[in-house]
Amino acid sequence: MNKITRSLFRQKSGIVGLTIITIVLVLSAFAGLFNHFDPNAIALEDRLLEPFSAVEEGFHLLGTDGLGRDIFARIIYGGRISLLVSFSAAMISAFLGVCLGAVAGFYRGWLDAVLMRITEMQMAFPFILLALTILAVLGAGLLQMVLVLGIGRWVVFARVVRGEILSLREREFVEAGRAVGNRNLRIIFRHIMPNLTAPVIIVGSFTVATNILTEAALTFLGVGLDVSIPTWGTMLAEGREYLPGAWWLATFPGITILITVLGINLFGDWLRDYFDPKLKT
């Protein structure tokens, strides 16, 4: 049993988080193996069936919506889109934040001052208002959502990376790189960047969880993804119209979001504890 496995088994919350993430990913990636219903197939004769309802075509585990579409099928197929948007946006945020944070922390001076003022202004402005404004102009769509979330979260990566580089730039291995004639960019990408893997992974895990919630919130408000695309946020938006009589339409997508975000946060907590030298025994 290696060190990572031992650490994971010592912190049971990490195992719970990893298990939840694995289940969600497997269900989303192999949705067709777990449900034979088409998530977009309309069957008005089966509309608003309660959970555990059996019909001629099969068994509706979580019931159906107002158009007779299977809720379970839409959740597991919608997970593909929700996770794709969240992970893609987190990768864009990481790329922008790491590059800009590294440049600001290494070169310092006026460049650092300008970039940090930009991050402070963006962090001071409510992100939901910024996203609503951009999406209102660009319109709803998958690419627009990824870009909005990616551009909106880079500041967290930038500040973390900058703080790490401020301490790393004075280390002996950086001085040794300068002594042998390495250029600054080579020192940053060859010697400093490998030491930023842990904090970037930790921030990235929490960013994915935040993106899932934000995508659902924006779609719920009607400015996120197109209503024809099955996502957890779309299901919440559609389910609010039926809350008094068909509670399951919004409840199960909401629970799915809750469990997924909880799993990512639990696993992120374990990553933070594992990579933080102050918490190692």
Image (cartoon, rainbow, N blue to C red):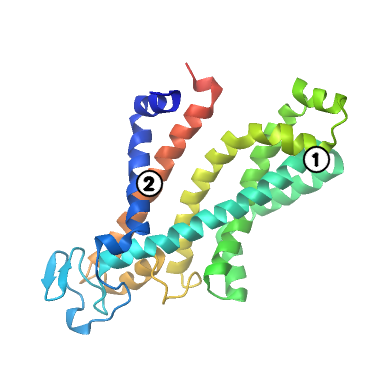
Residue at the image position 78 percent from the left and 34 percent from the top: 187
Residue at the image position 53 percent from the left and 38 percent from the top: 202
Q: Work out whether residue 257 can be spotted.
A: yes
Please provide percent x and percent y for residue 55: 12, 74
Amino acid type at image mark 1? Leu
> Which dot marks residue 195?
none
Q: Which of the 4 image quarters holds residue 27?
A: bottom left
Q: Work out whether residue 107 can be spotted.
A: no
> Mark 2, residues whose alpha carbon is within 10 Å: few (<14), some, or many (≥20)?
some
Please provide percent x and percent y for residue 105: 76, 37
Please provide percent x and percent y for residue 232: 38, 63
Mark whose residue sits in front, 1 or 2 = 1
> Which dot marks residue 185?
1
**Could you give the CA–CA distance between mark 1 and mark 2, rounded to whole angstroms?**
36 Å
Q: Is 189 placed above or below 169 here?
A: below
Q: Residue at the top extreme?
A: 281
Residue at the image position 54 percent from the left and 26 percent from the top: 276
> Mark 1, residues whose alpha carbon is within 10 Å: few (<14), some, or many (≥20)?
few
Viewed as shown, does residue 153 lie left or right of 54?
Answer: right
Badge 2 is on which residue? 21
Q: Quadrant of the N terminus?
A: top left
